[in-house]
Image: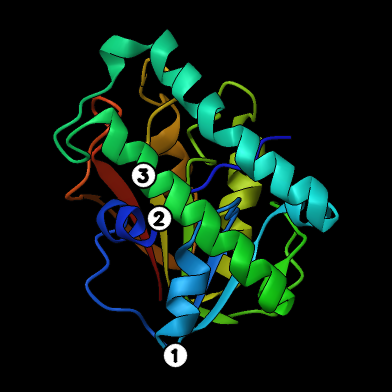
Amino acid sequence: MLVTSRSYAEYEAMFDLKELPDSVLDCCAGGAGFTAEAAARGVDAIAADPAYELDHPELVDSVRRSLPATSGIIGEHEGSFVWHWYGSPERKDQYRIEAADRFLQDVAAAPERYVAAGLPDLPFGDRRFELVLCSHLLFTWADKYDRDWHEAALRELIRVSNAEVRIFPLVLQGAGESIPWLPELLDSLEGVTYEIRKVPYEFQVGADEMLVITRA
């Protein structure tokens, strides 16, 4: 199991975060530094990921191994990535290293913020969080998880949100193909409105949009 790390700055751009509400869930968060930074800003921030079942040494090892592994995936699909947001591969690597360090420090200091759980079943009450974020899981792995799984996962993210769910990106990992059943899936959701919104971030070619779902 590899636990990918992303920085708070990456989250700000991926999800177009201009300010944070009182409570936020990051699901599935991996080794991201977002929850630690949000908590430091006074937010009730929780991260959920199945990887948090690992004992601490295994989690540290998985986070550290994910750093070069991510670069390997990029190398396999070199023409599918652009560098205008990061500036250079070295800068991207620096973001990820800093995020991993931030995550590992915080999960050791405040383990209650890191809940071992995954979609489509989350151990939180209805409308628990003002904002729910999900990066690089839904749609990214649509070749592994089918439409029914995505529908169940979306409904669960909506259930625990009191206001908004934001999901990024909306294309497959690797070459970045679109998801043909996405419009049909979104139209099947009840009690919500949704929009697909451009964000100030693009790394995978064409992955510059997020899905915003708002509860009625």
Q: How far is the residue under mark 3 from the one under mark 1?
A: 25 Å
Q: Secondary structure at mark 3?
A: helix
x and y percentages locating residue 102 in the rendered image? 51, 63
x and y percentages locating residue 132 in the rendered image? 49, 67
Decide if residue 190 is in sight here.
Answer: yes
Relative to 38, is 211 on the left or the right?
left
Mark seen at residue 7: 2
Relative to 124, is 76 on the left or the right?
left
Which residue is disc 3 drawn over? 94
Which label lies toward us, 2 or 3?
3
Residues packed near mark 2 inside 10 Å, few (<14), some (14 to 19) or many (20 plus):
many
Please name the residue shown 24% across and 24% down the image: 205
Among the two numbered marks 2 and 3 on one chain, the one whose residue lies closer to the N terminus: 2
Above or below 71: residue 50: below
Residues under numbered marks 3 and 1 in contact, where contact means CB atoms less than 8 Å apart: no
Q: Would you identify the image quadrant in which residue 91 lies?
A: top left
Badge 2 amino acid: Ser
User: Which of 16 and 127 lies nearest the eye of the viewer?
Assistant: 16
x and y percentages locating residue 136 in the rendered image? 48, 41
Badge 3 amino acid: Gln
Decide if residue 23 is in sight here.
Answer: no
Residues under numbered marks 2 and 1 in contact, where contact means CB atoms less than 8 Å apart: no
Which residue is disc 1 drawn over? 42
Q: Would you identify the image quadrant in which residue 65 lies?
A: top right
Q: Secondary structure at mark 2?
A: loop
Please name the residue shown 43% across and 54% down the image: 98
Which label lies toward us, 3 or 1?
3
